[in-house]
Amino acid sequence: LCTTLFIMYTVLFYSCSPNFYVPNQQHVPGFTSQGQTKLTASLVLNPDKDVKGGDVQLAHSITDRTAILFNVNKYYGYNKSSRFISFPFGSNNYDLGGSGHAFEAGYGYYKVHDRRIIAEVYGFVALASFCNNTHIGDLNGNFKGKFTRLAIQPSITYKTKYFEAAVSSRI
């Protein structure tokens, strides 16, 4: 029984997965009126795994209830060694890396309640690509792909003159 459970655990939770993954940031502009524009940029530098990249997000409120949003991101990473990975066939000579980028456009609706609470829902379409590379000894693996993603993102924002907090999800 223990051997069966161990094998099931190994297959279910330790399966082959990409070694490089960075999700894009959710875009929650928190507009309160027509004609507002927001530009956000972020940069990621992770020296432990040499992950670099960033996001740029632009949004504009077209009317007092609707807005358009655009996101673009690019990430890449490289890891020559890792203390968390060991290979059963005795080779510790490996390289792990990957990259990805995406362009996302959205349109949606926002409504201000009680001057501080903003309810928003946006629909997005994204065009993206990724590449994961694994080189272990004489074994080489490349996992590449392109995809289109559709998403709906509802959110609630609490906003004052000096503070803003939001809760959102993507479906």
Image: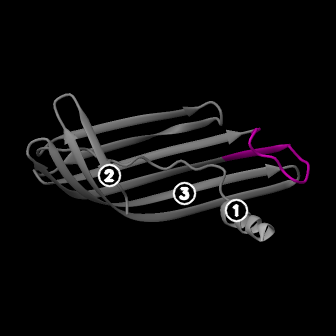
Q: Of label 3 and label 1, which has the lower sequence position?
A: 1
Residue 15 badge: 1
- Rounded to the nearest angstrom, the CA distance separating label 2 from label 3 is 24 Å
Q: Are marks 2 and 3 in contact (CB under 8 Å)?
A: no
Q: Of label 2 and label 1, which has the lower sequence position?
A: 1
Q: Secondary structure at mark 2?
A: strand
Three-letter amino acid code at disc 3? Ser
Q: Which residue is mark 3?
A: 129
Question: Extreme top residue here?
Answer: 162
Three-letter amino acid code at disc 2? Ser
> Residue 95's quadrant in the figure?
top right
Q: Which residue is mark 2?
A: 168
Q: Residue at x 70, y 64 (%)?
A: 9
The picture places residue 162, in percent across and down from the top left corner, at: 20, 28
Q: Residue at x 16, y 45 (%)?
A: 117
Q: Secondary structure at mark 1?
A: loop
Crowdedness near tag 2: few (<14), some (14–19) or many (≥20) residues, C-alpha within 10 Å:
some
Residue 137 badge: none
Q: Which residues are magenta?
A: 81-97
